[in-house]
Image (cartoon, rainbow, N blue to C red):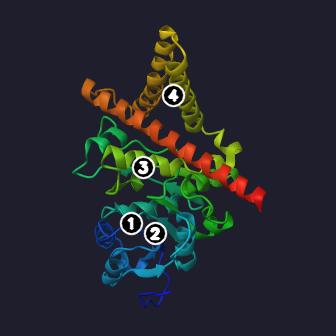
Amino acid sequence: MNELTKTETSSPYFSIVMPAHNEEEHIGSCLRSVFSSDYDSAQYEVIVVDNGSQDRTREIALNTGQARVFELTEGNVGAVRNYGAAKARGQILVFIDADCLMDKDWLNRAEKLIKDRPNTAYGGGVKLPSNATWVETSWLLEDSEGQPTLPKHLIGASTMLPRKLFFQIDGFNELVSSGEDTDLHNRLLSENSAVFICHSLDVTHLGNAKTPMQFINRQIWHSENYTDNLKKSFKDPIFLITLLFIFLLLSLIIQIMVSKNTFLIAITLAALLTTPSLLSLKRLIRSGNFTKTPSEILKIYCLDLMYLVGRSLGTLKSLIRSTTNLTKNKRD
């Protein structure tokens, strides 16, 4: 393991933990945004954990001369975040992704929040970059005042909580390849810990999916753990909607191949195409912004259709993997 450390006489207040994997495009901007903070630089440290990057991520992080840089070549993102937290010296842990930007006053607002309600976990939302594509603007819907829609759960891009509380609940789940932030949120609630999500901790996300294919691939990745814990997945409304979408799609294919009942085919097709609109309506209601043009609404619908396509492919991928592993275990 290699490490670059700052020599300090006292422990910082904040430890900002940043997992990074092949983030050479954005990590420099991310680190500059943190180190440009108006907050006392002696009161925070930045810990970058390089997760086996094959590009210049580690080199760029080291060249800042201010971050503590570690390597964890293997492990899911939860393990990478936990590794960084274990190296932290601060009282308060902040988790931010290497493709996000903090504004200059972020840490000052964070300090006020955590001092007002000390034993609380906090989170923020993600703002659009200035050069956002239609995929980004159709996914990260802003409200009528131009603020991002706050997430329902903590997100890894912007999470803050006391170090003591983090280790009391054993940190992030290291077994899942995604969704470790939602899992952390749920376990905090199960332990009766307060969780508060607000705009004060919003960050600007540079690494959004910018094209339809990038978006679909990201949804495949997010859903490839669905069959690992079916009991938990069946409590997730998105998983249930994904199953409905898969069922309708398979039904449509079978009907086209073996049935001549055009009315039934039309009904199934209509139901299939209506399913994404439920997600679109839900997201528009959450944003509170109903001033969208017909063109914008169509783009939002198309993105939710791609969302369900990606989630369906990820679910099928997860099912195939689980079946393969089960067959292999039986042979062994």
Give, as a three-letter code, the residue at label 1.
Ala
Q: Is residue 189 in sight in this rendering?
A: no
Residue highlighted by disc 4? 249
Residue displayed at 33% across by 85% down: 65
Measured as percent of width and height from the top left, residue 297 is found at 31, 28
Which numbered disc, 3 or 2, marks the residue closer to the eye?
A: 3
Q: Where is residue 318 drawn, in percent x and y?
A: 59, 49
For image coordinates 30% across by 49% down, the residue present is: 210
Q: Earlier in the sequence, mark 2 or mark 4?
A: 2
Residue identifier under label 1: 98
Q: Which residue is mark 3?
A: 217
Q: How many badges with numbers are in the image?
A: 4
What amino acid is labelled 4 in the image?
A: Leu
Q: Report the front residue among 228 and 185.
A: 228
Q: Quadrant of residue 254?
A: top right
- Between the residue at mark 3 and the residue at mark 2, the CA separation in whole angstroms equals 20 Å
Left or right relative to 48: residue 195: right
Q: Disc 3 vs disc 1: Cβ atoms closer than 8 Å?
A: no
Percent of width and height locating residue 299: 31, 32
Give above or below for 39 relative to 291.
below
Secondary element type, mark 1: loop
Q: Is residue 132 above or below residue 5?
A: above
Mark closer to the chain start, 4 or 1? 1
Provide the residue designation for mark 2: 19
Residue in the image at 52% along x and 46% along y: 314
Crowdedness near tag 3: few (<14), some (14–19) or many (≥20) residues, C-alpha within 10 Å: some
